[in-house]
Amino acid sequence: MRSLVFLLLVALASAKVYERCEWARVLKAHGMDGYYRTSLADWVCLSKWESSWTTTSTNLNTDGSTDYGIFQINSRWWCEDGRTPHSKNACNINCSDLLTNDVGVAITCAKRVVRDPNGIRAWVAWRSHCENRDLSEYLAGCGL
Ligand SMILES: *[C@@H]1O[C@H](CO)[C@@H](O)[C@H](O)[C@H]1NC(C)=O
């Protein structure tokens, strides 16, 4: 029983779900505000709709690739998961590293994605939920 409780605590500890302003502060500390013509609110909005700010989020795509982590970064182009044919791994990382509480890895990879010509438009959720919208609610009350 004690070990079960321990395992449960480990599981809870590793499935980090950020609170909105907490996540916005982490993004800002990592230099995301203004990074390649993006705003802090763009990133808070994008990650809300991609993962609900959950570091352990994964989703299988119809093409057999998988989206990983708080930004739902795709294994076709950006990371290696050992089961996506012809993947590019442009971030040069193991996809599982996008699921840990060390969000610096995911943020560094998101920066790599946004430096591509498509920029932040690479994220479908950004286009459908954040583009051309008033995003002020995403930073409201955060003091940022
Ligand atoms: C990625 O990391 C996981 C967990 O550490 C490991 O099991 C897996 O073999 C690694 N995959 C690749 C493709 O390196």
Image (cartoon, rainbow, N blue to C red):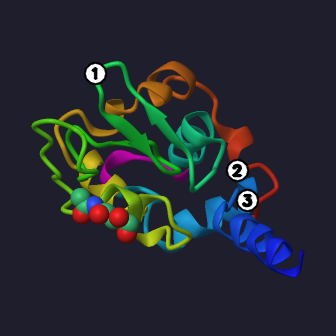
Does residue 21 show up magenta in the picture?
no
Type of the residue with mark 3? Cys
Using the image, determine if residue 99 lies above or below residue 115: below
Most foreground residue, 19 or 13: 13
State which region is magenta: 36-40
Q: CA distance from mark 2 to mark 1?
A: 35 Å
Q: Which disc number belongs to residue 21?
A: 3
Label 1: element kind = loop
- Left/right placement of residue 142 relative to residue 69 reads right
- Left/right placement of residue 144 relative to residue 74 reads right
Q: CA distance from mark 3 to mark 2?
A: 7 Å
Residue at numbered disc 1:
63
Does residue 38 show up magenta in the picture?
yes
Q: Main secondary structure of the magenta part?
A: helix
Type of the residue with mark 2? Leu
Q: Which disc number belongs to residue 139?
A: 2
Where ligand 1 lies, by image quadrant? bottom left
Task: Give the position of the C terminus as an image quadrant.
Answer: bottom right
Using the image, determine if residue 97 lies above or below residue 20: below
Discs 3/1, front: 1
Q: Are discs 3 and 2 less than 8 Å apart at CB? A: yes
Which residue, as the protein is rendered here, is positioned at the far front? 1
- In primary-sequence order, the first of circles 2 and 1 is 1
Q: Residue at x 74, y 72 (%)?
A: 7
**Circle 1 Cα neighbour tier, 10 Å, few/some/many (<14 / 14–19 / ≥20):** few
Residue 34 pos. (x, y %): 41, 56
Q: Residue at x 53, y 63 (%)?
A: 27
Using the image, determine if residue 50 lies above or below residue 92: above
